[in-house]
Amino acid sequence: MEKTGAEILLQALKNEGVEIIFGYPGANSLPIHDSLNESPIKHYLVRHEQAAAHAADGYARATGKVGVCMATSGPGATNLVTGIATAYMDSTPMVVLTGQVTTELLGSDAFQETDIIGITMPITKHSYLISDPDDIKTTIKQAFEIARSGRPGPVLIDLPRDVMAAKREQSEDEDSTATVPEKQHLESKKDKKQLQQIANYMNMSERPVILIGGGVKLSQACEELAELIEKGNIPFVSTMMGIGSVYASNGFNLGFIGTHGNKLANRIVHDSDFILTVGARFSDRSTSIVKEFAPLATIAQIDIDPSSISKVIKADISLVCDICEALAKLTPLVESKERSGWLGRIEKERKALGKDRAMKECGPAGAFIRDVQTAMPDETVAITDVGLNQIWTVRSWETKTPRGMITPGGLGTMGFGLPAAMGVKVGMPDYGVVVFSGDGGFFMNIQELATISYYNLPVKIVVFNNGHLGMIRQIQDLFYNARFNDIELGNKVDIVAVANGFGIQADRISVEDSGVGIEKMCASDGPFLLEVLVDPDTYVFPIIPPGRSNIDMIGGRQG
Amino acid sequence: MEMRERIIAILVNNKPGVLSRVTGVFGRLGYNIESLCVAETISPEVSRITSITNADSDFIEKVKKQLSRLVDVLDVIELVPGQSAQREMILIGIDLDQKNRPEVIQCVGMFDCKIISMRNDYCIIQAAGSREEMGTIINLLKPLGIDKIARTGVVALQQKDSEF
């Protein structure tokens, strides 16, 4: 039976389990949109390609499946770039499809031609230009394998229009047999020795800590990790990406480390004598001054990505391996210990720092976020944008499931929240979905209110409005002698009216007076936007000043 | 850290765009490529890239790990002097006149070079050897008036116990 390239493509996507594509059509991707008429794959039409990439990213982070987005050549493809970079930094499995000019026009500066493979080379795990319809099946299979294997990431496939339109003879149930060479294994003697040695270090150490990164969720190793923590009586901290890997109410949880992290987490890491790092890459936001990070600790690092080992912090012992497999094999080697001295000391510090202090540190916004959590269903995914809203949310929302909190930690992409929440809702229709954004990030992808309205996606949208770029304001206030500049957004836009104009119910409340607004938002069946007025002087504390180490957190303005 | 020339050999799939992915890694890490040689191996699907970079020892670890992340990179290895054979070839164009001709020809004889193209007023010399030897030849011929040179960059092979 004869099939077009586009039909072969869609069949291959279906074989990979793709049900949803977020995208925006254009002349050079039209053969694919034409064939989508006959495909069970549902295409969500966004209002800007950047949102398609963020939505696919949110979809992937929430469901664990590979997210797929699609745009046409030229401007369509370049608009995806920020979304691809975001996914790359946070290791989201994603396949990006871009239309391209016909093969005979390639390189001729044709209408809507860009070298998108060249542009995205540093922010994709791999990319393909398909120049022969016979390569489609194999390429798609490889692309998905690459996107989800090892350290996951985005893979881009550039699809010239003529290749999509060309016809090829296809047998109905022909299955391609392409495989990508497997690079990871944990069967060698050396690996087993390393594993035993990590266990020895842990058994010998008096003040051990486990540092959890985003890789634990990606490897679906949360249960294995919880078992290790419980067996060894080992307190743990996480990076921002690792939040939610192990349930927060567990007494061993010290919070997350770094610039905006918890004081207790930063202090205990500093005092520890052994750190088992799993799936974390020691970003500068987590370590601050590298030389002063955990000066007393022996550092063990387990990661599936060899390039993450000792990249920033030199690991004394390391293991390149899938975390899930490593932890499952490590736990039996770890001795069950009481560690009453170490845990007692931590408890003492916790008390000294004040039990509810972390709560107060996020001010009225933190209280508001907790009120929202109480009002939303238990099974709710919280999405953040970037800025004060992000720190308030990750510190105040009690993340109970590994995929319960979605935040663009690596790239710090303002404008991520709203479109990502859209993707989460599409992927998890039975879950509550709430996005916390600031007015800055909200305006960056405000057009997606139209998509949310059109598909009637019941996303709850909280916009903290302080009329400013709040986090930048805080930095100017504390570290640039309060010389405020270029941060005032003002309050001339009636956000509630704008939302209503998009066909979305909305309300405006002050952050201190949240009850009725939250009730209204949660009672609504459809999408709902809650504008929450916040004093621009409300910041997030404690914070580590630039150029200082993790134990130099300050709790307010310095004298 | 000791800065010196480091030779890296990279086996890659012989496909379009692969070289630019590989060189992109060097650039992003902030290292300059001093020389680069690329050609297919005994298997036409696989190319060997041999590169020289002036770098400290940290570089080897970093570049190895980053290159190994590339799907089309099959293997990366540092070729250590003493355990590998290294050769480079140069073509040197020289303007000839009555005065320098005897000296040029003498030089060619001394260093086991070859004149591969000769006119009355111009010749092209082929030289092959170690990178140091090539440096010596260039220095010797420089005062005689080198017009231009083309170098292949170093190619190198590890002794047998390696996988290469």
Image (spheres, grey):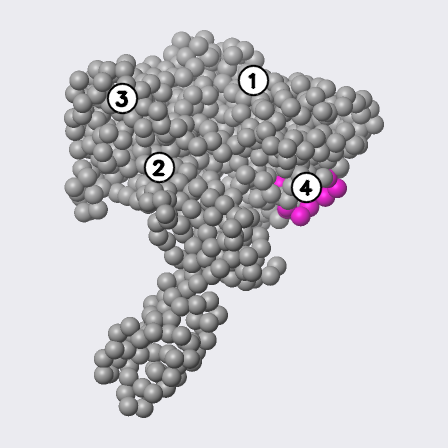
CA distance for labels 4 and 1: 31 Å
Res A283 quadrant in image: top right
Determine which of the numbered discs, if any, sits on residue A127 in the image: 2
Q: What type is the residue that disc 2 sits on?
A: Ser
Q: What type is the residue that disc 3 sits on?
A: Leu
> Where does the image place residue A432, in percent across and percent down from the top left?
47, 13
Q: Chain of mark 3?
A: A
Q: Is residue A155 shown above or below A372?
A: below
Q: Is residue A143 shown above or below A484?
A: above
Q: Chain of mark 2?
A: A
Residue at horizontal 53 percent and vertical 14 percent from the top = A515
CA distance for labels 3 and 4: 47 Å
Residues rendered magenta in the picture = A287-297
Determine which of the numbered discs, if any, sits on residue A322 in the image: none
Q: Going from the N terminus, do you reach mark 1 or mark 3 first?
A: 3
Q: Which residue is mark 1?
A: A401
The dominant secondary structure in magenta is loop
Q: What type is the residue that disc 4 sits on?
A: Asp
Q: Chain of mark 4?
A: A
Viewed as shown, does residue A333 lie left or right of B143? Answer: right
> Where does the image place residue B48, in percent across and percent down from the top left?
40, 50
Q: Are marks 4 and 2 on the same chain?
A: yes
Q: Which residue is mark 3?
A: A10
Q: Which residue is mark 4?
A: A316
Q: Going from the N terminus, do you reach mark 4 or mark 2 first?
A: 2
> Where does the image place residue A417, in percent across and percent down from the top left?
44, 27
Q: Going from the N terminus, do you reach mark 3 or mark 4 first?
A: 3
Q: Going from the N terminus, do you reach mark 4 or mark 1 first?
A: 4
Camera-side residue of A75 and A520: A75
User: Mark 2, residues whose alpha carbon is within 10 Å: few (<14), some, or many (≥20)?
Assistant: many
> Where does the image place residue A75, in percent across and percent down from the top left?
26, 38
